[in-house]
Amino acid sequence: RAKAAGRNRFVLFDDAMQHTAMGVLDLEQALRDALLNDEFMPYFQPLVRLTDGAIVGYEALLRWNHPQHGVLLPGDFLKVAEESGLIEAIDWRMFRLAMECSRDLIRDNVYVTLNVSPRLFQMEGFDRRLLELAADSGFDPAHLRLEVTEGTLLVDPEAMVAVLQRLREASIEAVLDDFGTGYSSLGHVHRFPLKMIKIDRSFVSPFTAGVSPRSSAVIEAILALGRSLAIEIVAEGIETEYQREVLMAMGCEYGQGYLFAQPQPAAHWLAGG
Ligand code: C2E
Ligand code: MG
Ligand code: MG
Ligand code: MG
C-alpha cells in the first residue's frame, strides 16, 4: 500500500485504529465532514491489452483528498464507511465525479469501471438511479462497467441476476472483481451475465522467475471458463514484465497494474498520460 501512494504517505487511520471505538467515531465524523467539504475524488487506473499495452478502459478508484493528511486510500476508511452506512452517499458522490471527470476519456470502445459497494448494489432502484446519474452527468452508459464482487452477487443470486440483466439492457456491463478471493466459486459464474472477470492480485503476485506457483492452476481454470463463456479476463496487480509475459503466454488478454500505470487523476490521462 505504501507503494501505491508514494514513500512518505501518512496513514491517518490504520486497520487497528479502525477497530477502536474512538478511531471509529472520529473517522465517521471526519467522513461526514469530507462529504460536506467535497474531499472525495476519483483517480483512474488503465486496463490494458497485454500484447501491446493499448488502454482498453479505466478503473475509477476512490481517493480522499484530506486537507491536512493528503490523499488517503480506501484501505484507510472504507471499512468504517461501509459499517456506518456512509458508503452509500460516498459512492454516489464518487460515481458522479467519476463520470463527469472521465467523459472526455472515453472514445471508441474505451470504458470506465466503477466499484460498487455491496449494500448499494443490492438496494432497490440502484440501476434506475445509476442511469439517471449517467444522463445527468452526460456520460454514455454504453461506456460504463460496474465492478462487483462474488460476495455481492451470492447474497441473493436470483435478485442480482435480474439487476445485472436490467443493467445490460441499458448497455451497462458487469465486471466480477477480485475473483478467487471470496467464495472461489467457479461453478457459480455461468449464472450471472458478466462481461469481464478480474483475477485477484493474490494469484498474480506469486509469479517470479524460476517459480511455478500453485496459483497458475487457478488462473488456467479461470481462463478456460472465460473462453467457454465468452467472458473477458483481466489479471490484476501486474507489477513485473515477467508476470505480463507469463499471463500473456497463458492466454490472458487484459491486465492492470503498476507495471503499466499507477492510478492518477483524470487530468493526467486527458493530458496524454
Ligand atoms: P480493487 O477494486 O480490487 O482495486 C484494485 C486496487 O489495487 C486499487 O487499490 C489499486 O490502486 C491497487 N493496484 C492496482 N495495481 C496494483 C499493483 O500492481 N500492485 C498492487 N499492490 N496494487 C495495485 P485502491 O485504490 O487502494 O482501492 C482498494 C479497494 O477499494 C478497491 O479494490 C475497491 O475494492 C475499493 N474501492 C475503490 N474505489 C471504490 C469506490 O469508489 N467505491 C467503493 N465502494 N469501493 C471502492
Ligand atoms: Mg475494482
Ligand atoms: Mg479488484
Ligand atoms: Mg482487489
Image (tube, rainbow, N blue to C red):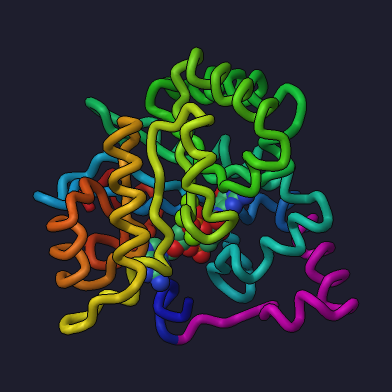
Q: Is the magenta stretch mostly helix, strand or loop?
A: helix
Instruction: Specify whether residue 11 is painted magenta.
Output: yes
Q: In this view, does 178 lie to the left or right of 11?
A: left
Q: What residue is at 82 percent from the left and 63 percent from the top?
A: 28
Q: In this view, does 198 lie to the left or right of 47?
A: right
Q: Is residue 56 above or below residue 237?
A: above
Question: Residue 74 location in percent, x, y?
Answer: 59, 63
Q: Is residue 10 above or below residue 189?
A: below
Question: Residue 194 location in percent, x, y?
Answer: 45, 32
Residue nearest the observer in this picture, 84 or 159? 159
Q: What residue is at 19 percent from the left and 46 percent from the top?
A: 49
Residue nearest the observer in this picture, 100 or 129? 129
In this rendering, the count of numbered labels is 0
Q: What residue is at 63 percent from the left and 74 percent from the top?
A: 68
Residue nearest the observer in this picture, 166 or 109? 166
Q: Is residue 205 above or below residue 7?
A: above
Residue sitting farthest toward the left: 52
Question: Residue 218 location in percent, x, y?
Answer: 37, 60
Magenta extent: 8-32
